[in-house]
């Protein structure tokens, strides 16, 4: 499909619905502080950034802007799902953690609130994976909800004013359960991370290699590990890539 013939994403028509890319589980969280923890995944559609190396372009890229060059069909990729169906699907997975990711899930955060409410009553915690450009709704900042914030560096391609939003970073940094996870390609990226960490007082910091194969992850982990530890930060791999490769829905 050409850029001129871009698909229009479906719009969730009612307040108690979400625009969903995919749901899957039980599986394990592959990244960050909860890596290895059994969980379910809810991947929401749409994103306000256009990272060149995005590993989920099928959630937002209707014009072939990412490195894949593929223009996905929004009508085929995204589905409007009511919140009761989402909750029932999660409970059927028998997990005590739901990872809400995207795309950029905070674009639908008001619609997400009933899901969080219902799952909290069932003892299911939430991790929201966000790119750090949208301020969290006050009702989403609560016990049992962690924000895994992944501000994007220059190599992601979007201009600075789009990918670094000071008010959103400040608000997220003051939520009670937060981690900042930066995707890096080589030790040179760590200097850019250090600048953001110092400017916004971000903590705790996790560094994760960019890579969609076990071989690339291994190589970049080796490059990054000592420098990350020296800076007093944490290191994450991508367990799901090691276990299942670059397979969608794993
Ligand atoms: S913020 Fe995340 S989902 Fe959005 S384009 Fe970047 S990597 Fe992809």
Image: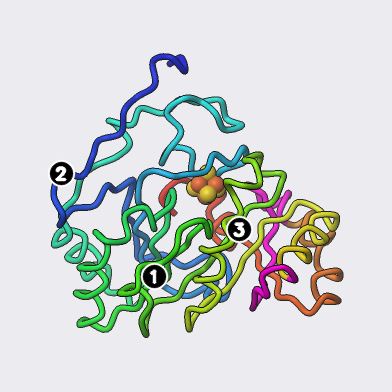
Q: Position of residue 237 (x, y in %)?
A: 65, 64
First to last magenta residue range: 198-217
> Disc 3 marks which residue?
151
Q: Secondary structure at mark 1?
A: strand
Q: Tell me which label, 1 or 3, sits earlier in the chain.
A: 1
Q: Are the residues tagged 1 and 3 within 8 Å (C-beta)?
A: no
For the N terminus, give its image quadrant.
top left
> Disc 1 marks which residue?
39
Q: Tell me which label, 1 or 2, sits earlier in the chain.
A: 2
Q: Is residue 70 magenta?
A: no
Residue 225's place in the image compared with 48, above or below, is below
Q: Position of residue 149 (x, y in %)?
A: 54, 65
Q: Secondary structure at mark 2?
A: loop
Q: Tell me which label, 2 or 3, sits earlier in the chain.
A: 2
Q: Classify mark 1 as within 8 Å of ligand 1 or not, answering yes or no.
A: no
Residue 6 in sight = yes
Quadrant of the image occupied by residue 238: bottom right
| Residue 125 located left or right of residue 166 | left
Residue 246 in sight = no
> Disc 2 marks which residue?
13
* Mark 1 or 3: the one toward you: 3
Q: Residue at x 34, y 56 (%)?
A: 24
| Residue 71 located left or right of residue 230 | left
**Is 83 or 15 nearer to us in this picture?**
15
């Amino acid at each position: 499909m050409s850029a001129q013939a871009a698909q229009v994403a479906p719009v969730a028509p009612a307040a108690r619905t979400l625009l969903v890319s995919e749901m899957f589980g039980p599986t394990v969280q592959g990244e960050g502080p909860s890596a290895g923890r059994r969980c379910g995944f809810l991947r929401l559609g749409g994103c306000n950034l256009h990272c060149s190396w995005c590993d989920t372009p099928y959630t937002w890229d209707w014009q072939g802007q990412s490195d894949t060059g593929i223009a996905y069909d929004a009508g085929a990729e995204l589905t409007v799902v009511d919140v009761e169906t989402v909750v029932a699907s999660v409970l059927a997975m028998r997990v005590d953690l739901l990872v809400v990711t995207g795309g950029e899930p905070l674009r639908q955060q008001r619609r997400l609130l009933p899901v969080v409410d219902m799952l909290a009553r069932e003892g299911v915690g939430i991790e929201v994976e966000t790119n750090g450009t949208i301020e969290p709704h006050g009702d989403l900042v609560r016990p049992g909800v962690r924000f895994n914030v992944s501000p994007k560096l220059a190599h992601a391609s979007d201009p600075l004013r789009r990918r670094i939003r000071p008010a959103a970073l400040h608000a997220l940094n003051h939520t009670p359960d937060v981690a900042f996870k930066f995707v890096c390609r080589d030790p040179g990226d760590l200097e850019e991370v250090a600048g953001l960490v110092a400017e916004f007082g971000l903590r705790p910091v996790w560094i994760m290699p960019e890579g969609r194969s076990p071989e690339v992850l291994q190589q970049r982990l080796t490059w990054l590990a000592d420098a990350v530890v020296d800076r007093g930060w944490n290191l994450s791999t991508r367990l799901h890539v090691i276990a299942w490769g670059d397979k969608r829905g794993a």
